[in-house]
Image (cartoon, rainbow, N blue to C red):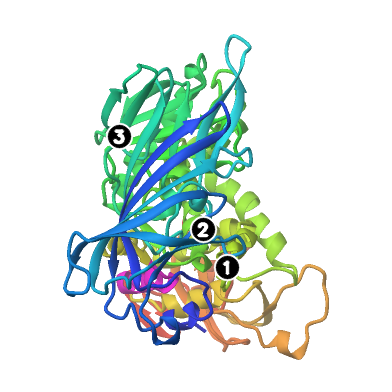
Amino acid sequence: MTSSSSDKAAGRVLLPSTINPTRYDLKFTPHFENFTFTGESSIELTTTSNLHDSAANGEKCREITLHSKELCFASASYVVVKTNREESPEGAAFEAEEIRVNNKMHTVTFVFGDAIPAEASLVLTIKYTGFLNNEMAGFYRSKYTDIHGESKFMASTQFESLDARRAFPCWDEPARKAIFGVTLTVPKNLDAFSNMPELSNKTLPGGKLKEIRFLDTPVMSTYLVAFCVGEFDYVQAQTEHGVLVRVYTPPGKSESGLFALDCATKSLDAYDDFFGIPYPLPKLDMVAIPEFAMGAMENWGLVTYREVDLLIDPTKASSNQKQRVCTVVTHELAHQWFGNLVTMAWWDDLWLNEGFASWAENWAADVINPNWCMWDQFTTGHLASAMRLDALRSSHPIQVPIQHAEEVEEVFDAISYCKGGSVVKMIRAVLGMKAFQSGLGAYMKKHAYKNTETYDLWQAWQDSSGMPVQEMMASWTEQMGFPLVTVSEEKWEDDKVTLTLEQEWFLSDGSELSEEDKEKKWCIPILTCTVEGTQQDMIFMREKNSNDYGTSSLQRWMGETQCRTRCPDARQAHVGDDRSFVDGNPIENPPRSG
């Protein structure tokens, strides 16, 4: 059932892979008086040896195509920095003769008079203008009322999934990672910040503007770039591991950021220890945005939030409000590793980001405040939401093939978040925390600053546990729905009970299954526990009907009057001996449920 990387990539609409960015130097000057901004991008590029192979009519490539949306271009040129070819000497400069904008495909193509050199390093410089829109996407404006009752504007960014192209021309695909250097020129009385700390801050001639240059980012995807311009107060603290954390609030509301600040510092330290990899950046800013389309956005080092999901008065807030702010914070900070440090190669693995973060938000919140009983709430929250949607014929698999990037907006739903989180919780129960955590750590170390597919994570967990993770998880992520497991037969003896189990696709509307529907099956882990709560063994149900397995030590399993069985879905188990089994084969160190 598992698809190969080449199969998954078939049909994707991508920019040519023969020209690749390695670094962007971005300069922005917002103009609040007419809601526009001027921009200048200098992009370091490398060209491949087969650059000219795909050119039309056997001609050499003279075009560079990038993603762009709602930008107006003034000029574009490139300089050859390094080349192994003689046709374009190092230092040669070339101006674009034609600029073609494709509004349907959201691209811009710069056409040059001479062939672009293959196997070369170039610097492409583009000058353009854009709009500070009011659509809460790209580089946009928000209106707010200050403490004196005056209406004012600030500017911030929201680039996920496909709106970095609204702020600067780029290769707006998650796998086209690069380094970003950001410079903002803003009114002197306003604050401005970006993913990284300030490198320099100087007042420009005339005294009305200042230019703020920020340190280079790590290698990362375009959708994680962020910057904000406006008036802010802030509160700050340092984690035990030495990371400076700030919560930026509207002026006069800094006290309302203290609760989120406490959650952030504690969860950063918890994730440091859990992943075995320190938080990669020198600072973390969290910013409350007056007009924001979603709950929050995990921009690396500069997380943006809807105000109600960041700012509360803990002396007046209800427990539900506190839990909401805490889990939004812990969700976004989980992404600083799972999504930012290691990123999905394409949008069809979005669930890798959101499903894991949905599990991690509850894990970290439980560490911060065990009294909230987050895992009990997970069952009635995430799991119930996932099952409601996934029990419909109109549901979709966790992994959805995406050809056009615009299709990703259709899978930001309870399947990616809630079912994804539930599947991660299930695999943690199957593997046990030790193998689960060590597999994650190995996955992070191996793929840091790179991109992955779902099977890379399955392989890491398979290596850490010795279990058939890829086989099991493919049935849960590559097909929609979930099974109903029933006991079709039970045989009682003096010292054991033998159960026969069957599985079929569960539909909440009770509609009759077709012959094809009846063939659907899952690789189901069966976990059982004794009346004392100790888990004895675990097996996998791979077929529609299980073979008969005897469950020994009936007294321990049943207690006096009842049988307690724990199965996220099922085959059967030998409970009560000293061994654990996977399909009849003994395994060492049986996983512990919890």
Q: CA distance from mark 2 to mark 3?
A: 35 Å
| Image vertical order of residue 132 relative to residue 587, above or below | above
Q: Position of residue 447 (x, y in %)?
A: 30, 64
Dominant secondary-structure state across the stretch colored magenta? helix
Residue 346 versus residue 126: which sits nearer the camera? 126
Disc 2 element = helix
The residue indicated by pointer 1 is: 398
- In the picture, measured across the screen, residue 563 lies left or right of residue 468, that is right
Disc 1 element = loop
Q: CA distance from mark 2 to mark 1?
A: 9 Å
Q: CA distance from mark 3 to mark 1?
A: 41 Å
**Which dot, 2 or 3, sits closer to the camera?**
3
Do tag 2 and tag 1 residues touch (Cβ < 8 Å)? yes
Instruction: Kindly identify which numbered label has been placed on residue 213.
Output: 3
Three-letter amino acid code at disc 2? Answer: Gly
Q: Position of residue 509 (x, y in %)?
A: 82, 69
At label 3, counting other C-alpha atoms closer than 10 Å, the crowd grade (few under 14, some 14-19, many 20 or more) is: many
Q: Position of residue 188 (x, y in %)?
A: 39, 19
453 drawn magenta? yes
Closer to the chain start, of discs 3 and 1, is 3
| Image vertical order of residue 286 relative to residue 392, above or below | above
At label 2, counting other C-alpha atoms closer than 10 Å, the crowd grade (few under 14, some 14-19, many 20 or more) is: many
Closer to the chain start, of discs 2 and 1, is 2
Three-letter amino acid code at disc 3? Answer: Arg
The residue indicated by pointer 2 is: 355
532 drawn magenta? no
Residue 590 seen from this side? no
The magenta segment is: 452-465
| Image vertical order of residue 502 relative to residue 335, above or below | below
Give the quadrant of residue 367: top left
